[in-house]
Image (cartoon, rainbow, N blue to C red):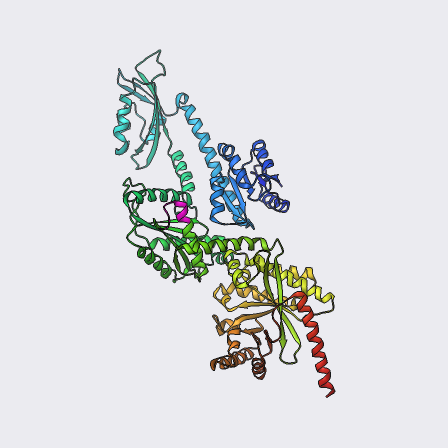
Amino acid sequence: MEGKNSKRILIIDDDKDILKLLTLKLGKQNYSVIEATNGNMGLEKLKSESPDMVIADVNMPGMNGFEFCEKAAKYSSEKYIPIMIMTAQDDQESVNQAYEKGATDFITKPINQAKLNHRLQFSLRTSDIAKKLASREKQLLSAQKVAKMGEWIYDRNKNEFHCSSEVANIFGIEKSERISYEDLMKYVVDSDNSTSVKKIKSLFNSEYEDFEYTIKTDAGELKRIRQVIDTSVNQMENKDRIFGIFQDISDLRNAEKKVKKLSLYDSVTGLPNRLFFKRLLEKTVASSKRHDRRFALLNVNLDKFMRINTTLGHDQGDNLLVAVSERLNQVIRDLDSLNSQDDRSLFESGLLSHFGGDNFIILLNDISNTDDAAKLASRINTLFEESFEVSDKEVHVTTSIGIGVYPEDGSDVEVLLKKTSVALHNAKETGRNCYRFYTDSMNTLSFQRLSMETSLRKALEREELLLYYQPKVSLLDGHLAGAEALIRWNNPDMGLVSPADFIPIAENTGLIVPMTDWVIEEACRQLSSWSEKGFELESVSINITPASLTDRNINEHVMKHLRLAGVEVSRLDLEITESVLMEDVDVILSILNEFRELGASISIDDFGTGYSSLSYLKRLPISKLKIDQSFIHDLMYNEDDPIIVKALISLAHNLGFRVIAEGVENKEQLEYLREHDCDVVQGYYYSRPLPANEFYQWAREYESTLIDDQKVITAI
């Protein structure tokens, strides 16, 4: 229900479902929503409705979000109407373009409700401050000649100075007939005094003057004073009389400073933001060019921060960012004053900036060689080996760092920032928790990666993803014990893309979460389809990544897909890797216990290669261990692997778990595993992963052959 004083939000999006969802959610937050389904309609409603804020999608037919910002910029800035852009890509280029076209903020899809509420409140509050400042400024301009509050009159012939009691209040002194102009000027701080005292003596040849200065009261309070002097008042009565007013504008100037800080400093960490940093960087480039100096940019990104943010919540994520900024400040030397007029050095050694999200930029000034940047990056990586404490929780986070050097990597601000981003991506792709300098070869790889990432983002909507199935066979009686669902990507241009190429990209970009959701939905649908044909596959196992597992809504998603497909939860086997034990174990345990209580089976995948801990294994509600194929591959040739496999099977059985061996390729491996009581095997010995229809045919033939063999055995 619309509140009495609700803010009016204009939402522009051609996706009616998103429009409807946002309208519903914002309505519950007491906002009044104005809807527009395209940019042209949004522009008309912006001018006719004058909303308090605009939220516009980037991708719209006709006029897109960037074009809308550009056309609406003048009107919205005059009315102090903030514009927030919605984009599905949280990349630097899109964000930069949005700001350049007039946007004041952005938010990424899918939209996090808490984050949206926070940004709406922040933007609306900043807009209100700007409106109030503009309104107050206009009032002050008109009051300069008519207001009598804090008034004074000076008669130069009689050398008499008279002021109202409000003037005494402003200066913090007792009202007295003996107050002189010189008495008041004694309160002006030394830096302003000489100028202010001289002002009144030079006014007889001008009609109007206003100026500002700072005073310090007897109580030690600093105030910013605006003084307006008008020699034209009462000129007919006495030409020697000067009329003026004093006004305490401390609140106004403090508010202006706050608004300026909001525009130039990050609200979470208090560090210089993207806008401020780029301005300083432009000055540094100019200064370094004049004095033939070098500097380095370090693009510092937190590894897997999104998972931490999801697990702990955005408030605690912000607390972690503050702690990170404090630690990063430890590794750069004290800065000189940013207001220094010395062009030789804007600051002594380095400047730290928060570019948004989990991204920080360090400017390392006036380096002698690239080793200076390498040493700093190495020190950062070392310092982050120590954990952070956030709300009594111990949190481990590492950093990946991309480094660009001026002038070798470019003499333009945007080029330098872009190249540090390319180097950062390379650091991410080569294992994280490391640093990389930019090289030209990275640029080619970056374009290839960006092209693949762009195509991958569209793969879901274009239905390019497929599920292949690899059978699992019981060694007890040879029956088909289930199958593992494995995602594949069939791109029209690149063909069948290897999971080794696109899964890391999906994990780094967060696409792995919606992809995993699709895998669960498709596997449930396929199980239902096979059941209708009379083929009741015992179970399908699905790989669940740590990023998906820490999504607190994953249980609801799984149950929804099972319910819609009419599939029993017991037919779903969720495979998690040992690396999940490095995440927030309490959260993981809670989610896995819910899975187990619902009836799902849980397996540890790639067992023996990660961070195995008996204490964790005993706590996790798992029922199966899957021995990694690296131990099976050389089972008959490496003298250590048979011992390891035998020990793993024994350990699992002693803990009450079933054992699955993957990567079985020949009969010798199969017989060894059967001899040592392995429960289930999977591998090329039986079949490669197959598309759904081919797997169905294989399973039917396998079952038929198995039944015939059993009949022969029975007959014998």
User: In the displayed image of the protein, which residue is found farthest to the bottom?
Assistant: 716
Question: Magenta residues?
Answer: 409-417
Question: Quadrant location of the N terminus?
Answer: top right
Task: Find residue 28 and report its image quarter.
Answer: top right
Horizontal and vertical percent position of residue 693:
68, 66
Task: Tell me if I can see residue 320 in this picture.
Answer: no
Q: Residue at x 48, y 37 (%)?
A: 127
Horizontal and vertical percent position of residue 581:
49, 67
Q: Is residue 204 left or right of residue 690?
A: left
Horizontal and vertical percent position of residue 52:
54, 36
Using the image, determine if residue 699 lies above or below residue 382: below
- Whether 138 is among the magenta residues is no
Using the image, determine if residue 531 lies above or below residue 205: below
Task: Find residue 216 and report its image quarter.
Answer: top left
- Whether 414 is among the magenta residues is yes
Task: Tell me if I can see residue 427 in this picture.
Answer: yes
Using the image, determine if residue 259 lies above or below residue 270: above
Horizontal and vertical percent position of residue 493:
57, 56
Q: Nearer the viewer, residue 128 or 707?
A: 707
